[in-house]
Amino acid sequence: MEEQKHYKTRQGTVVSDKMDKTVVVRVERLTKHPKYTKVIKHTKKFKAHDEQNQCRVGDVVEIVETRPLSKEKRWRVTEIVRRAAG
């Protein structure tokens, strides 16, 4: 039987597009503090591969985990969910 592979996907905002074929995506997630139950916002930045250099700063994109493409690049852009205003 063939097993189906499930890759991690994240949705975030492009914060930098200055590199060639690479964008930096900021992903935010909300968690509750274990003791005080306050909702805390955690942010993490991922470098993602953008083959056609289509992404611009402010775009909301979906990224998927992939094989290592460079020293820090382990994700690639699958789709642009929403374009930046302007």
Image (cartoon, rainbow, N blue to C red):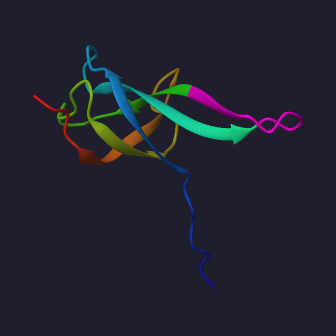
- Residue 57 location, x and y as percent? 25, 24
- Residue 36 location, x and y as percent? 84, 33
**Image position of 80 (left or right of 42):** left
* Residue at point 26%, 46% (across, down): 80
Residue furthest toward the left?
86
* Residue at point 52%, 20% (across, down): 71
Above-or-below relation of 66 to 48: below
* Residue at point 80%, 39% (across, down): 37
Labels in figure, total: 0
Determine if the magenta segment contains residue 86: no
Residue furthest toward the right?
35
Dividing the picture into quadrants, the one containing residue 43 is top right
Residue furthest toward the top?
18
Which quarter of the image is occupied by the N terminus?
A: bottom right
Determine if the magenta segment contains residue 36: yes
* Residue at point 57%, 65% (across, down): 5
In front of the other: 50 or 13: 13
Above-or-below relation of 42 to 9: above
In front of the other: 33 or 65: 33
Above-or-below relation of 16 to 62: above
Which quarter of the image is occupied by the C terminus?
A: top left
- Residue 64 location, x and y as percent? 46, 48
Which residues, given as a range, are shown in magenta?
33-43
- Residue 78 location, x and y as percent? 33, 49
